[in-house]
Amino acid sequence: MLNDLWRSTSNQLQLSYYNEVTSKVMCDTQVSWNGWYRLFIQGQSVQMPDSCVDKRSCGTHAPLWLNGGHPTVEDGVVTRAVCGHWDNNCCHFQSNPIKVKACPGNYYVYELVRPTTCYLTYCADVRNISINNATLTSNTTLAAPGIFYPFGSAAGDTRNAAVDDGNSSVIPLLSPFLFFGRTYQQIYVNNNGHLTFNQASSQYVPYPFLANGNQDIIAGLWTDLDNRVRGVVSYHQYTSGSVLTRATQDINNHFPNLTFSASWVFVATWDKVTYYPNTNTETSFQVVLISGTHFSFILMNYGDIAVTGLPVEVK
């Protein structure tokens, strides 16, 4: 067992006015690692994060996260790269790889080894753990609900720049997307919680949709979001693989009288982004575009949504 509360991704080191860390900085090179470990936080089974973690989290300078995603039980023992976030680079430190195994009891174990340098520590993140379609729900706040499609660096996402009111560059679509009679070949992922087709948008105050009939908008959670201090806005599109299989199953479950097969999926994720100017908030959601067999669909998946007094539009 590895049951250190300070390893939690929510544990942030505090900085003084002189930009020096005022709390104790941990380093896992000082631990005598031997064998396989299961992670706990306050008695709850947890796992290593498999997406980038904010620097100065987990009681250290450069927190270590699993690069490559978690395996299934059928995968057996796999080897995964381990990265440490520093200097605006999620993988600035490439630590020694570790072995990971999914267990039938719906948890993971890790063969942890000595990191390459200080100050690095292995992180622990409470998540919805899904193995072989079985879900283990923790009593604590979930960082990535099981309803979410794959996202983050492990899914090969492209990340938006950490810019207030920013957006992606134009994204050419690998398959045309039909949206209320209009066919689009490109899209923009905007940091303030919405997608646009004709041009990027920095608009952070939502307006009634009919007020701008020339610009189609898909609003997952349109409000004044800020990914500069924490949170990641990312996206990925798929034309094959397990994501299409899942999308096909989701649509057929929602529309049992429709025989549908997904040929293209676009996943945009806002992971633990904050509201401006409240940088201590976290909000997570996804917008998933699906097309195939002459139909188009939009799924909106929501994780933890922080309370806000800001104007919000979802549509």
Image (cartoon, rainbow, N blue to C red):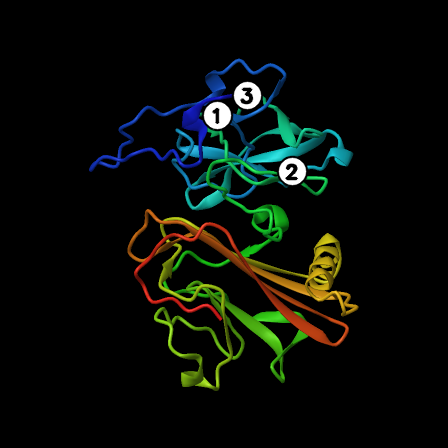
Mark toward the start of the polypeptide (1 vs 2):
2
Q: Is residue 24 above or below residue 251?
A: above
SS class, disc 2: loop
Mark toward the start of the polypeptide (3 vs 2):
2
Q: Give amino acid for label 3.
A: Arg
Residue topped by disc 3: 114
Q: Position of residue 49 (x, y in %)?
A: 54, 38
Tags 3 and 2 in contact by the CB under 8 Å rule?
no
Q: Nearer the viewer, residue 151 or 107?
A: 107
Q: Residues within 10 Å of mark 2 (few under 14, many from 20)?
A: many
Q: Residues within 10 Å of mark 1 (few under 14, many from 20)?
A: some
| Residue at horizontal 27 percent and vertical 35 percent from the top | 15
Q: Nearer the viewer, residue 16 or 314?
A: 314
Q: Which numbered dot is residue 70?
A: 2
Q: Quadrant of the N terminus?
A: top right
Q: Is residue 283 above or below residue 122?
A: below
Identify the image quadrant of residue 33.
top right
Give left or right: position of 2 versus 10.
Answer: right
Q: Is residue 222 visible?
A: yes
